[in-house]
Amino acid sequence: MKKFIALLSLTLATTLSFGAETEKVCIDKMTKDGKPVLDKAGKPQQECKTIKVHKKLEGTKVPEKK
């Protein structure tokens, strides 16, 4: 039972995003020649992915070694 609870909590922790927002990014498909792949309407086909965007934290500068 303890193993099940630990596995369940680990699964929930990995699936939840802590403070990360998602953004949809689309890129045009290209052929080997570098030309865009066109669909029936003549528009370039796109590959879309959903990525996580993390907030960039500002901190103090690391001291240099002498």
Image: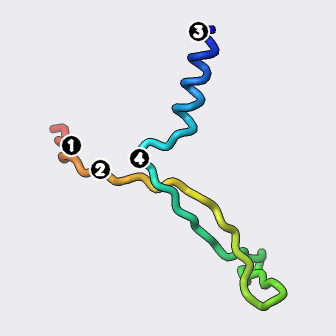
What is the secondary structure assignment of the residue under circle 1? loop
Binning the other alpha carbons within 10 Å of mark 4 as few (below 14), some (14 to 19) or many (20 upward) gives: few
Callout in the foreground (2, 3): 3
Q: Residue at x 78, y 84 (%)?
A: 38
Binning the other alpha carbons within 10 Å of mark 3 as few (below 14), some (14 to 19) or many (20 upward) gives: few
Q: Amino acid at mark 3?
A: Lys
Would you name the residue on which mark 2 appears? 57
The label number, if any, that marks residue 62 in the structure image: 1
Q: Amino acid at mark 4?
A: Gly
x, y percent for residue 49: 63, 61
Quarter of the picture holding the C terminus: top left
- The CA distance from mark 1 to mark 4 is 25 Å
Would you name the residue on which mark 4 appears? 19
x, y percent for residue 57: 29, 50
- The CA distance from mark 4 to mark 2 is 12 Å
Binning the other alpha carbons within 10 Å of mark 2 as few (below 14), some (14 to 19) or many (20 upward) gives: few
Would you name the residue on which mark 3 appears? 2
What is the secondary structure assignment of the residue under circle 3? helix
